[in-house]
Image (cartoon, coloured by chain):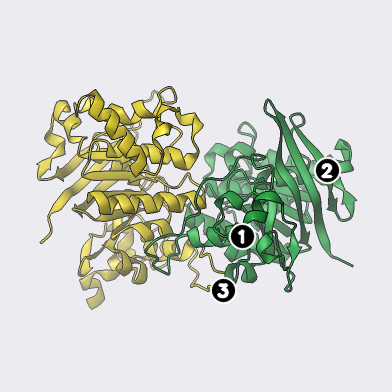
Chain colours: A green, B yellow
Amino acid sequence: MSNHVLEVNDLQTCFSSKEGTIPAVNGITFHVDAGEILGIVGESGCGKSVTSLSVMGLVPSPPGNINGGEILFNGEDLTKATEKRMRKIRGNDIAMIFQEPMTSLNPVYKIGDQLMEGIRIHTKLSKKKAYLQAVDMLELVGLSRVTDLMKSYPHQLSGGMRQRVMIAMAMACDPKLLIADEPTTALDVTIQKQILNLMKNLNEKMDTAIMLITHDLGVVAEMCSRIAVMYSGKVVEEGSVQDIFRDPKHPYTKGLIDSVPDMRVKKDRLYSIPGNVPKPGAIKQGCAFAPRCGQAFSRCAKETPELLETDNGAKVRCWLHHEQ
Amino acid sequence: MKSHLLEVDDLKKHFSSGKSVFKKKSQPVKAVDGVSFAVQEGETLGLVGESGCGKSTTGRMLMRLIEPTAGAIHFQGKNLLELNSESVRSMRKDIQMIFQDPYASLNPRHRVERIIEEPMIVHHLGDKATRKKKVQELLEIVGLNSFHAKRYPHQFSGGQRQRIGIARALAVEPKLIIADEPVSALDVSIQSQVLNLLEDLQNEFNLTFLFIAHDLSVVKHISDRVGVMYLGKIVEMADRDELYNNPKHPYTQALLSSVPIPDPDHKQEEIELQGDIPSPSEPPSGCPFHTRCPHVMDICKSVVPVSQEKEKGHNVACHLYDDQHMAI
């Protein structure tokens, strides 16, 4: 029996626009195990944020629409769940934190009221008990002067403190899965370090699975046990952090790792992947990475490769690894 | 001895927070508070620091886009702060800037050819035909095609727009380019393209860069020397390898240990700084870093440390390296 908390199978999320239907997420498959941290890596426009919104049932419809596939959360297909059911799951079983903590907190409500609102919606706690629970959560995420903080407004806090409040809010109902969409991108390095350590501690202490969406390979290497690399709406490689960093199979993953300047080694010249990230849906035939790939051959332009399992359990979507 | 192209001496910028009916007297925000450094011809000086440390304000003061409160900026021996507005404009021919946001720094209603040509018109360089030819050349140099000249900024991707910004800066053949976070808005694979381009251009045109960024890995890659800023002051400055291999200031040490390394097997000494960066409007007394410093001493709370050369070319402003203190 698998212990997948979340299983996404062949998910397709499209947006309709004047130019037709654009597949932002084009058949992605991955899973998150209980208690693990899965990193989802990719550049802008690869569909990583739309994936997380799809899981949360937050894709605005219209113009967005989940056209196919399934999202299994503890065996329940969320694509078929009613809005009422989704509202129960959101915040209670699956919680999410965003990149910009300022825009995800309501500027006209006090921190305490916003925290207690979430707690009281999902539990039957009295106001008094919800207050105590909120205070506990703020302490858990490492904030001090908590009673003053309960009475503060979001603008009175620094970026790092706001992100801690967001995490407190997300963890308040002890979710099974926390989706963190670029949680430290807007923060300074020393603050980023604090927040990453906090998330790691919570993951260990409360056994919450985390789906960490980021473009920063350094963050992934530090935090995650497994990674899924996305390109143009598809997962192109998936495997353990060690395997992917030591021996990336897909040319895109390899290019991405080589493009990052590493503080410890002096590279005279950075590797760079030629060309630009294609717009979603721009490449209709063949492998989406083929036009930028140095190892592409005739088959790559014609047929789309499948996500193929390799010997060590890793998966890669590339014709180079299809034997014969 | 190599000549200094640019010398900055005790540069300060204090923003007064304005008079208010409700506040009697408000403290000025000391965005930059006594910064000194020199840049040699042909080198790249990196300025790193977290948000609010004053690195961008420093860059803008060099262009005189922000008027400094005090200090001196010598460019090729001339004090820029004594120039009148006419001479400032002609000085900008030699100092150009590349901005962070390629979306906001290009006029959306102008075609690329006009954007790149404009600095040449302002500085009366060449006639129409030579300028047109130069635009074509510049586009090729930064890795775009000449047919791109007729397009508008919105038709380009982020990386291509940053290339247009670079072409515009190069149009007047400057000596010094101030690059303020030029790659932080770009994706990883595009970031490396732009960094490589900047390095190529430096070699080809003997450019001098002041490279302002928050990403320590990027700064290490591109710089010859690096200065670390904290709350309006340079706390440490040294040659690149010296600074990254042998950081002396506790802030630099913590900053370097905070950078996530893209290698899952890498284990590093963990220094997690407590607390947030203090507000520059109420900077701590003494050493600005003492509120978060793991090695704080009594002297740090009252006396501002002076930057001193500890090893050749390695300056640090920290009481841990005071000679008297060592003696006690």
Give the Cα distance between marks 1 and 2: 36 Å
Whether residue A63 is situated above or below residue B14 in the rendered picture: above
Is label 3 in a helix, a strand or a loop?
loop
Disc 2 crowd rating (10 Å Cα; few below 14, some 14-19, many 20+) is some
- Between A320 and A25, the one lying in front of the other is A320
As drawn, the label of residue A198 is 1
Q: Residue A123, can we see it? A: no
Mark 3: give few (<14), some (14-19) or many (20+) Cα within 10 Å. few
Q: CA distance from mark 3 to mark 2?
A: 38 Å
Residue A115 image-quadrant placement = top right
Q: In the rendered structure, which amino acid carries the disc numbered 1?
A: Leu
Q: Which residue is mark 2?
A: A68
First of labels 1, 2 by sequence position: 2
Which quarter of the rendered picture does the N terminus of chain A lie within?
A: bottom right
Image quadrant assignment for residue B145? top left
A16 up-or-down from A159: above or below: above
Mark 3 — residue? Answer: B265
* SS state under label 1: helix
The amino acid sitting under disc 2 is Gly
Report helix, strand or loop for mark 2.
Answer: strand
Q: Chain of mark 3?
A: B
Residue at the location (67% across, 55% down)? A299
Same subunit, tags 1 and 3: no
Q: Amino acid at mark 3?
A: Asp
The image shows residue A122 at horizontal and vertical percentages of: 82, 44
Q: Quadrant of the C terminus of chain A?
A: bottom right
Q: Nearer the viewer, mark 1 or mark 3?
A: 3
